Amino acid sequence: MSAQLIDGNALSTQLRAQIAARVGDLTARGLTPGLAVILVGDDPASAVYVRNKVRACEVTGIRSLLEQYPATLTEAELLARIAALNADPSVHGILVQMPLPRHIDPHKVIEAISIHKDVDGYSVQSAGELMAGLPGLRPCTPWGCMKLIESTGVPIAGRHAVVIGRSNTVGKPMALLLLQAHATVTVCHSGTSDLAAHTRQADLVVVATGRRNTLSADMVKPGAVVIDVGINRGEDGKLCGDVDFDGVRQVAGWITPVPGGVGPMTITMLLANTLQATERAMS
């Protein structure tokens, strides 16, 4: 058996077309969604990520405001700029690209963004809304993972899901989203004594550790849905995930590739959050 690929590029294209249509309706009514993207410093990877986000905005009709600052920008200056964007009614979402220079506290920066414009869904209040099951802006990568799982047609309710990783940006919100969808959820991490014992029971596995080959074929229940959030470099220099793709593909029912799986969905859900923030501002 060979698993069916969950094509993140194809799903992303479909969802972005829907987003573009809704953005077009808003623009026709005189309100264009606006996303402010702040890049501090000259980290090459961050520059690529920001460029991809700005390009995605352009394609869907969202107005992007890219602000680039040198690494010498002070924390106070950045917080002041965020405050100004919070007060700007033409800006509906604010994204500060991470990582920041060491002299800037990322927690202070995240908490400075208005809850109504927190399109990354990283703030304590956004996390609280998710925990309480309230409507809100969800972290983009876990939300994208949910869309990928839903696209398979495999029911989530009643299934056993294992999330490997407990970060605030992926692991924890992923577990909460799966709980909201009525899955039975186990969260595993570096302190889990027998990871394979948990994953072999799982109908759904989401792997977000940042370590190659975290999940191998012998750890997977036949027919399971496997979502690989990781982005690593193999010995050959090529991109790979946290999953032993070639091996696990022979056991799983569905699997995301790297690249072309979770990655494009993260940016798509950023666009969806910006659209949602705009629509909420109208209500």
Image (tube, helix red, strand yellow):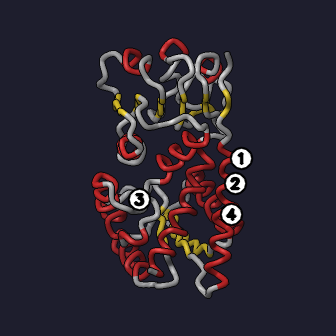
- 241 vs 68: above or below: above
- Labels 2, 3: front one: 2
Direction top: furthest residue:
218
Which mark sits nearer the N-terminus, 3 or 1? 1
Q: Which of marks 4 and 3 is nearer the N terminus?
A: 4
Question: Which residue is at 40% across, 33% downward?
Answer: 158
Q: Name the residue under label 1.
A: 10
Q: Could you tell me how far apart the alpha carbons at marks 1 and 2 are, in whole angstroms?
A: 6 Å
Within-10-Å neighbours for mark 2: few <14, some 14–19, many 20+: few
Task: Work out which quarter of the rendered image holds the N terminus and state it.
Answer: top right
Q: Name the residue under label 2.
A: 14
Mark 2 residue type: Gln
Q: Position of residue 202 (x, y in %)?
A: 44, 24
Q: Earlier in the sequence, mark 1 or mark 4?
A: 1
Label 2 or label 4, whichever comes before in sequence order: 2
| Tags 1 and 2 touching, CB below 8 Å | yes
